[in-house]
Image (cartoon, rainbow, N blue to C red):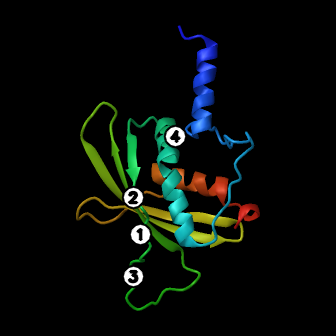
Amino acid sequence: MIRPTILQRIAIACLSLGTLHFGLSPAIAQPVPKICPSELKTLSKAIAKDLPSYLTRTYTRLGFKRQIITVSLPELEPLPLAKDRSPSPNDPQQVFFSVLERQPGKVETSQRAYWLFISDTKLGWRLSMAFTRISNAPPEDVSDGAIANAVSTWLKEHCTASNRS
């Protein structure tokens, strides 16, 4: 059995390396401020950076046996939604992510591509819709799925009206 003092030393070492922080800044043990970027490019990069941990927690809560290996950098080039209509500034913004994951104990990986629609509202950024597509099949609505839950949770925690940058 490991003595508590050894566990405490390991935790202190992890805190000093920044690998274990529980939402606290390792240098001063203060809550890390959650700032919501106002620009889509910065916002989507921040989501991509944190998405593995948010998606892993969502999978665990839902009982899914998947491990997130990595999340791609976001793609922001929107796809045309209608032939006869040009985009409006009030339209939800399109963000594309790819997630590489595997089942625990397995070597095989799977890659999932996601198409997110994010809206800038008076209350902050919100996820409007989420889709995934496998091979040549039509896009599947996953707005109630794990990816939508993880992104919505991130947006709620970081992007309320009071913490906009």
- Residue at mark 1: 75
The answer to which of marks 3 and 4 sits earlier in the sequence is: 4
Q: Where does residue 56 sit, x and y in percent of width and height? A: 47, 42
Horizontal placement of 102 versus 131: left or right? Answer: left
Q: Where does residue 76 sit, x and y in percent of width and height? A: 44, 73
SS state under label 3: loop
Tag shown at residue 57: 4
Disc 2 + disc 3, Cβ < 8 Å? no
Q: Which picture quadrant has residue 92?
A: bottom right
Q: Is residue 94 above or below residue 30?
A: below
The answer to which of marks 2 and 3 sits earlier in the sequence is: 2
SS state under label 4: helix
- Residue at mark 2: 72
Tag shown at residue 118: none
The answer to which of marks 4 and 2 sits earlier in the sequence is: 4
Horizontal placement of 117 versus 160: left or right? Answer: left
Disc 1 + disc 4, Cβ < 8 Å? no
The answer to which of marks 1 and 3 sits earlier in the sequence is: 1
Q: Amino acid at mark 1?
A: Glu
Q: Amino acid at mark 3?
A: Pro
**Residue density around tag 4, few if under 14, some if 14–19, many if 20 or more, within 10 Å:** some
